[in-house]
Image (tube, grey):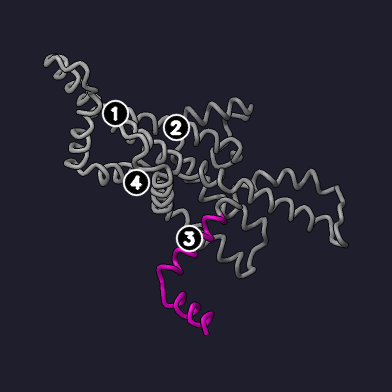
Amino acid sequence: MTEMGTTEEAEKNPVRKKHGIARKVMVCIAVAAVALFLLPMRASAAAVDVKVDGGSGADTLEILETLTMLALLPFILVMTTCFTRIIIVLSFLRNALGLQQTPPNKVLIGIALFLSLFIMSPVVSKINTEAYQPYKQEQITQEEFVHRAAKPLKEFMLKNTKKDDLNLFVGLAKIKSTTAPEDLSMTVVIPAFISSELKRAFTIGFLIFIPFLVIDLIVSSTLMSMGMIMLPPAMISLPFKLLLFVLVDGWDLLFKTLATSFNL
């Protein structure tokens, strides 16, 4: 009776059902990205015939690939989505305010994850309709699923990658400059995307520091002119920083800036 009640409750709760679908599709994104790295490995290992408990060599390789995907899953989710830029900006904000552990790291990571899911929702929906659902209904093969799922993710990364960074890694990989960006492998696109994300995150962090730095300078100059040298300026400036951040509705402004800074 308890299991039936739980099942009926889950079916009646559309929010829980949507979260379940979103979680599955995010896993598919990571699987698709990792599988692109493993396709050359599969080709080179195709000649190896390993059998475990009467199973075929192909089954053994699929098990090894699955374990590798699970191990690399967190890194894929971090490096192929907008998570990197968001978490770095949030860390800069906390340092600019002069707060050590507020908000805590777990809260910052949670905010970055759900903001990433919100921003990446068009990409997730495209992967769900074009790759996950056909594969779930056994309409396409696993290799076709990998290529279909990786295409929207690569498009997202290319739209948010600076041309100079892309050309840098194309040159390092000794690829012809006439090659179309869509034809580049993920081993070239992902490092270029990460480099661009780091540059943008540090630029946003610099802009965040400016108003709070002005408050620190004003407070320090005021304390020195009053002869209050022994009083830490950070203790006095912190309330003013918090007041400024609240008055300008800083969280909404920051989230809006981050959401609109990505090209989808």
Where residue 62 sits, quadrant-wise, is bottom right
Q: In this rendering, would 93 be left or right of 57?
A: left
Between discs 3 and 4, the one toward the N terminus: 3
Question: Alpha-carbon distance for marks 4 and 2?
Answer: 16 Å
Instruction: Judge depth for marks 3 and 1 and give the one in front.
Output: 1
Q: Which residue is mark 2?
A: 198
**Pointer 3 residue:** 22
126, above or below 158, in the image: below
Position of residue 206 relative to residue 115, above or below, is above
Q: CA distance from mark 4 to mark 1?
A: 20 Å
Tag 1 residue = 209
Q: Residue at x 49, y 46 (%)?
A: 155
Examine the rendered structure and indicate whether residue 125 appears above or below residue 15. Answer: above
Q: Is residue 58 above or below residue 1?
A: above
Classify residue 15 by image quadrant: bottom left
In front: mark 4 or mark 1? 1
Q: Which residue is mark 4?
A: 259
Q: Main secondary structure of the magenta part?
A: helix
Q: Are marks 4 and 1 in contact (CB under 8 Å)?
A: no
Question: Does the segment drawn in magenta span residue 5?
Answer: yes
Q: Amino acid at mark 4?
A: Ala
Q: Residue at image x 41%, y 52%?
A: 114
> Which is more toward the observer, 11 or 118?
11
Percent of width and height locating residue 181: 54, 38
For the record, the magenta segment spans 1-28
In the structure shown, which secondary structural element does the residue marked by tag 1 occupy? helix
